[in-house]
C-alpha cells in the first residue's frame, strides 16, 4: 500500500487542516497549474491511490483512464467510460470531497483496502463484477474499517468471491 504514497510525495509537512500549495508545470505548455490541497483532500488522494494498487489497477483493471494522473484532481480520476470512477461534491460546503465511487465490470480484483474507511463522506459505493472475466473479483472479506462509512445511502458490491458473511453490525 505504500506505493500510493507516490501520489502525495510532493507534499511537505503534515499540518492540521492546513492548505498546501503545490505548483507544477505541464509538459506541453508553460502554463503553471496551482493545486491547493487540504489535509482531508491529501488523505482522500492517498486512499484512492491505495485502492488502485490494492484492487489490481496495474494488472487486472480493464480500463484505467486517467486514474492516478498527477496533473488531474482526484475528482477527475475516471476510467475511459463515464460514470466509472470517482465523483465529488459540487456543494460549496464540501467542494472536492469524494461522494461516489462506481466500478462496473472493470476487472477489480484483490481485496478492498482498510484505507477505504477513511472516505467517510462517500454516500454511494458500487463495485459490480457480474459480467467480469473469471478471476478478476474481490476476495477475502470487507474491511472492518468500512464501519466508518456512516454516510452511505447505497452500497452494491456484487459478483465477487468473499469468503465470509457480512457482520451484522457493519452498517449500524
Image (spheres, rainbow, N blue to C red):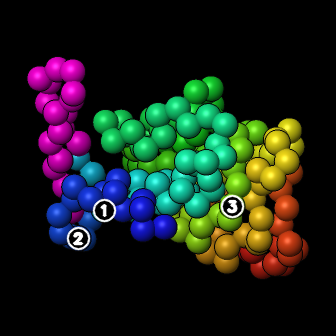
* CB under 8 Å between discs 2 and 1: yes
Residue at the limit of the structure toward the front, as seen here:
59
Magenta residues: mostly which secondary structure?
Answer: strand
**Does dot 2 land on a helix, a strand or a loop?**
loop
Residue 109: mark:
none
Whether residue 49 appears in this view of the structure is: yes
Going 60% across and 67% down the picture, which residue do you hit? 113
Going 27% across and 59% down the picture, which residue do you hit? 9
Q: Which residues are magenta?
A: 18-35
Q: Residue 141, position in %: x, y?
A: 76, 72
> How far apart, in angstroms, are the residues tagged by discs 3 and 2?
30 Å
Q: Is residue 57 left or right of residue 106?
A: left
Q: Residue 31, position in %: x, y?
A: 14, 24
Residue 39: mark:
1
Q: Residue 49, position in %: x, y?
A: 46, 54
> How far apart, in angstroms, are the residues tagged by discs 2 and 1?
8 Å
Q: Quadrant of residue 146?
A: bottom right
Residue 14: mark:
2
Q: Is residue 108 left or right of residue 1?
A: right
Whether residue 40 appears in this view of the structure is: no
**Does dot 1 land on a helix, a strand or a loop?**
helix
Quadrant location of the C terminus in the rendered image: bottom right
Q: Is residue 168 above or below residue 78?
A: below
- Which residue is identified by label 3? 110
Amino acid at each position: 500500500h505504500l506505493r500510493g504514497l507516490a501520489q502525495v510525495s510532493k507534499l511537505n509537512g503534515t499540518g492540521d487542516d492546513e492548505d498546501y500549495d503545490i505548483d507544477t508545470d505541464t509538459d506541453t505548455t508553460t502554463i503553471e497549474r496551482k493545486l491547493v490541497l487540504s489535509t482531508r483532500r491529501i488523505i482522500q488522494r492517498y486512499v484512492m491511490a491505495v485502492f488502485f494498487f490494492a484492487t489490481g489497477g496495474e494488472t487486472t483493471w480493464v480500463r484505467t483512464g486517467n486514474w492516478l494522473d498527477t496533473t488531474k484532481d482526484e475528482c477527475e480520476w475516471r476510467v475511459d467510460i463515464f460514470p466509472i470512477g470517482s465523483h465529488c461534491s459540487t456543494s460549496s460546503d464540501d467542494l472536492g470531497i469524494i461522494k461516489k465511487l462506481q466500478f462496473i465490470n472493470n476487472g477489480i480484483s484483490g481485496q478492498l483496502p482498510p484505507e477505504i474507511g477513511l472516505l467517510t463522506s462517500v454516500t454511494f459505493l458500487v463495485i459490480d463484477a457480474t459480467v467480469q472475466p473469471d478471476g478478476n473479483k474481490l476476495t477475502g472479506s470487507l474491511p472492518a474499517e468500512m464501519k466508518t462509512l456512516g454516510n452511505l445511502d447505497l452500497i452494491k458490491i456484487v459478483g465477487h468471491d468473499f469468503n465470509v458473511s457480512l457482520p451484522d453490525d457493519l452498517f449500524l
